[in-house]
Image (tube, rainbow, N blue to C red):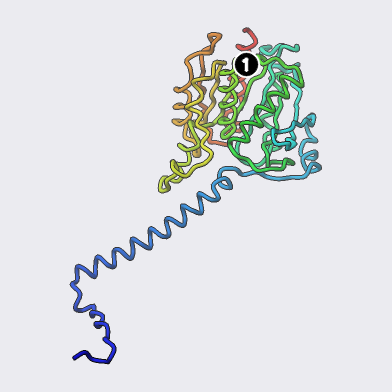
C-alpha cells in the first residue's frame, strides 16, 4: 500500500560523512568561482571605461585658454571636423632670427610643424615644446583633440585620424602651404596619430616633408599589455594605434627621439617602432634614432633640451637641402 503522507527528501549529508578530498575540491571551486566573477567584473568595467583611461583631456573655457597663451605670441586658429565640431588651436610663428646654426632658411620655403599632442591635458601644456621649435625658425601649428581644451566631443582613434586630416587640409588647402614643407610631429599617443596621417598621405601620393616621433610606441596595445599584463588587453582594446604596422608605408624622412629612462613607454618599444620604419625616405634621407640619456617620458626637455634642439635642427636642416 502507498502511504498518503508526503515523501520527505533525504537528509543532507553531514560534512563529516563527505570525504575530505571532496570537501577540499568544493572549497577550491568556490574560491576559483569567486575569483573568476571578480575578474570578469573588473574586465567588463575596464572594457567599458577604457577610453577614460586612454585619454586624459582637460577642458577649459576659451577665456582660460587665451590667458594660458599670454606669455608668448600665439595666434588662435580653428578648423571644422568631419562631423562639424570646431577644433581650436594655435599658430606660433618661428623666430627666424634665432634659427640654430643657420640651418632653417628665413623664407617661405622653411618647414612648418604640425604638432600632435600626447593623451593628457591640452595644448597649453606644450608651450615649452612650441617655443623650442619656434626658436629653430619654424612655424608651429597645434590643434587640440576633440574633448580637449575648448573643444567639444569625445576622442576615439578613428575620429582623431579624421581630425588630423582636417588639420592637414587646413594647412595645405586653406593656408596654401606645400606638403613638402610640413613636418608632422607626434609625442607619445600623438605619435600614433602622426604616424597614421603620414602613412595615409604617403600612400595617397601626398608626401609630407618629414615625420618626427617623440617617446611613442609600436602600438597602444603593446603598451597597455605591459601596464595591465593580467588583463586580456588584446581582445578588448578598441583604440589600438598600430603604428608599427603603418610606419613601413611612410616614405618621408623620419626622426625618432626617446628617453632611455622612459618608465611609461620603454625605449625598447621606441626602438622596435624605429626598426619597422623604412631605412631611408623616398628621397634618400636615412632614418635616425636619437636616445635621450637620463630622460623619462615627460621630463625630456629638462634633461636633454640641448640634444633635442640639435637633433631637430639637424633634421630640419637636412630637409631644407632637398
What residue is disc 1 on?
206
Q: Residue at x 74, y 32 (%)?
A: 80
Assign the C terminus to one quadrant of the image.
top right
Pointer 1: residues within 10 angstroms few (<14), some, or many (20+)? some
Q: Locate residue 292, reporting x and y percent.
A: 52, 27
How far from the left and from the top, in percent, is residue 211?
A: 59, 21
- What is the secondary structure assignment of the residue under circle 1? loop
Locate the N terminus and report the quarter of the image it occupies. bottom left
On screen, residue 4 versus residue 77, left or right, reads left
- Tell me where residue 215 sits by quadrant: top right
Q: Quadrant of residue 197?
A: top right
Residue that appears at 56% across and 33% down: 188
Closer to the camera, 187 or 167?
167
With respect to residue 184, does 24 lie above or below?
A: below
Query: Which is more toward the observer, 20 or 322?
Result: 20
Q: Is residue 310 left or right of residue 225?
A: right
Seen at 51% across and 25% down, the residue is 246
Name the one closer to the observer, 89 or 235. 235
| Residue 12 locus on image (x, y percent) | 26, 80
Camera sees residue 95: yes
Above or below — where is 34 with respect to 135?
Answer: below
Extreme residue toward the front, this view: 1
Residue 294 visible within the image: no
Amino acid at each position: 500500500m502507498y502511504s498518503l503522507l508526503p515523501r520527505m527528501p533525504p537528509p543532507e549529508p553531514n560534512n563529516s560523512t563527505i570525504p575530505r578530498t571532496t570537501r577540499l575540491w568544493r572549497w577550491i571551486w568556490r574560491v576559483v568561482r569567486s575569483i573568476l566573477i571578480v575578474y570578469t567584473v573588473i574586465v567588463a568595467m575596464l572594457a567599458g571605461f577604457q577610453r577614460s583611461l586612454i585619454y586624459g583631456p582637460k577642458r577649459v573655457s576659451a577665456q582660460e585658454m587665451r590667458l594660458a597663451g599670454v606669455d608668448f605670441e600665439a595666434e588662435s586658429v580653428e578648423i571644422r571636423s568631419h562631423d562639424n565640431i570646431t577644433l581650436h588651436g594655435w599658430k606660433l610663428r618661428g623666430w627666424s632670427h634665432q634659427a640654430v646654426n643657420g640651418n632653417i632658411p628665413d623664407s617661405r620655403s622653411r618647414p612648418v610643424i604640425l604638432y600632435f599632442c600626447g593623451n593628457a591635458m591640452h595644448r597649453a601644456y606644450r608651450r615649452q615644446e612650441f617655443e623650442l621649435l619656434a626658436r629653430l625658425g619654424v612655424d608651429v601649428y597645434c590643434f587640440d583633440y576633440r574633448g580637449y581644451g575648448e573643444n567639444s566631443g569625445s576622442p576615439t582613434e578613428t575620429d582623431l585620424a579624421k581630425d588630423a586630416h582636417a588639420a592637414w587640409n587646413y594647412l595645405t588647402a586653406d593656408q596654401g602651404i606645400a606638403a613638402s614643407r610640413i613636418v608632422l610631429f607626434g609625442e607619445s599617443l600623438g605619435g600614433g596619430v602622426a604616424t597614421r596621417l603620414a602613412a595615409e598621405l604617403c600612400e595617397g601620393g601626398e608626401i609630407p616633408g618629414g615625420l618626427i616621433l617623440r617617446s611613442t610606441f609600436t602600438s597602444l596595445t603593446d603598451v597597455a599589455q605591459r601596464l595591465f599584463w593580467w588583463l586580456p588587453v588584446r581582445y578588448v582594446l578598441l583604440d589600438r594605434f598600430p603604428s608599427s604596422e603603418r610606419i613601413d608605408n611612410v616614405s618621408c624622412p623620419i626622426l625618432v627621439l626617446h628617453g632611455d629612462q622612459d618608465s611609461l613607454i620603454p625605449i625598447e618599444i621606441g626602438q622596435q617602432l624605429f626598426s619597422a620604419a623604412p631605412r631611408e625616405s623616398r628621397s634618400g634621407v636615412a632614418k635616425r634614432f636619437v636616445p635621450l640619456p637620463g630622460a623619462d617620458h615627460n621630463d625630456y626637455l629638462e634633461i636633454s633640451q640641448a640634444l633635442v634642439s640639435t637633433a631637430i635642427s639637424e633634421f630640419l636642416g637636412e630637409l631644407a637641402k632637398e
